[in-house]
Image (cartoon, rainbow, N blue to C red):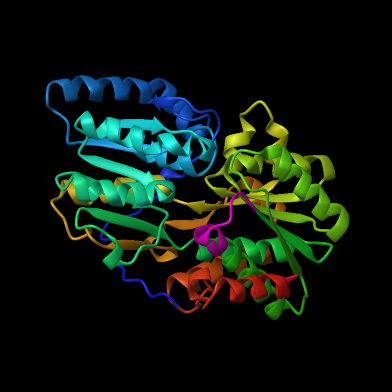
Amino acid sequence: MKKFLSVALVAAMSLSLVACGGSSSGETEAAAETEAAAAAEGDGAAEAEETEAAAAEGETKGRIAYIIGNLGDKSFNDSGEVGMNTLRAEGWDVRTVETGGSEDADKFEDYILDVLDQGYEYIVGSSTYMEIMARLAEEYPDVKFVGFDENWSDDQLPDNMTCIFYAQNEGSYLVGMLAAAMSETGVVGVDVGVENPVINDFATGYIDGVQAWNAANGTDVKVVKAACGSWTDPATMKSLVLDQIRNNNADVFFQVAGGSGDGLFEACVEQGKWAIGVDSDQYASYIDSENPEKADVILTSMLKEVGNSMVALFHRIEEGDDTMWGHTIQLGLADDSVGYVDNEFYQANVPEEVRTAIEEAKEAIAAGEIDVKSYFDFASEEEFNTYVSEAG
């Protein structure tokens, strides 16, 4: 079992930044099609222009390049963009670079080299770009690199690079409890985009939460899992969910699939099933969209506060704290960096006793009284697969 070192994040994590890919478009500073990003299309766009003007005059706090696949996922990437808009408003020169999906992987390094050539001092990218950034960090020792949603050990990280890793298993545990409580058929689903260690950590925590609910309530809710193989294939995701409804009688679904998750919501709308979103408040994202009916099946969303973590990290940098370089920062419920959406829709549709049990579990996890299972605790992939199989 691989052990990882961590550094505590000394920064306040405000929940006020709750977040709300698509097409490949190179570089953009437009915000995503989410509640928070909608504001960026107006005020945020103006702020971006102001920071660009300030950059020309050398007045910014620093220059950040945010490297992602695509905005518009109403999820992970958009959550990070909300944080970038906050940093723009605070005086940082931020450029968001959309690289496209895996089909454009041969261009990823070129995008990063472009912003390096343009003098950006901080390169921020998700786990997709970790190996490229680690290699370039050796070649550009005066530039700082930030990888997020990845759990590298300190000996893997160059001295000018840090990782932000989220305890997605903790937030997933809570929505696993919810799924088990709300299921009428005794079968719930967890459906993912592309399987990798981080995504498997979501599934691990979710299954653990389902089983914790079973143990506390004498139920026997099963979990079925599937992967559509893409972050941008809602049609395949919809087909997988429909199969789980027909063949497994599943009735509550947790999507961890980026843009592909839209297909899960569509299937739930058609079949009258409950869904759970991921990373951002996806109820809020859909309620004011062209398809508001999808909001009506989203009980809650498991939150990964990417934007919050970015703001907190750059506040540390601004204060002169350099202790994060060469280390991985691990953030969970205790840091308000993962969680779930507790909005009016959730309160109206989830019984009070269930909400109370979930909130009590949240507090217990944050206090270290509940140790949630993690994918990174398994000795092998085979052991994880056995865990998933036995849950079904």
Q: Quadrant of the N terminus?
A: bottom left
Q: How many marks?
A: 0
Determine whether 385 is above or below 313 in the image.
below
| Residue 329 in which image quadrant | bottom left
On the image, the x and y values in percent for residue 54 come to 18, 23
Say which residue appears at 27% left-offset and 67% top-offset.
155
Q: Position of residue 130 (x, y in %)?
A: 37, 51
In the rendered image, residue 174, in percent from the top left (x then y), is placed at 58, 64
Residue 199: within the magenta?
Answer: yes
Residue 21 lies, with reference to residue 202, above or below; the image says above
The residue sitting at the right extreme is 246
- Quadrant holding the C terminus: bottom right
Residue 178 position in % (x across, y down): 66, 62
* Residue displayed at 74% across by 39% down: 266
Asked if residue 253 lies left or right of residue 143, the reply is right
Instruction: Decide whether residue 210 is among the magenta residues.
Output: no
Query: Quadrant location of residue 340?
Result: bottom right
Q: Which of these two is toward me, 34 or 7?
A: 7
Give the quadrant of residue 150.
bottom left
Most distant residue in the front direction:
106
From the viewer's perspective, tell me whether residue 342 is left or right of residue 159.
Answer: right
Left or right: 35 as drawn, with respect to 332: right
Q: Nearer the viewer, residue 348 or 43?
A: 43
Please tell me which residue lies in front, 247 or 30. Answer: 247
Q: Does the rendering let one see residue 99? A: yes
Range of the magenta residues?
192-201
Determine whether, in the image, residue 60 is placed left or right of residue 248. Answer: left
Q: Residue at 62% of width from left, 28% of height from top?
A: 289
Residue 86 in sight here: no
Task: Give the residue drawn at x 25%, y 53%.
Answer: 161
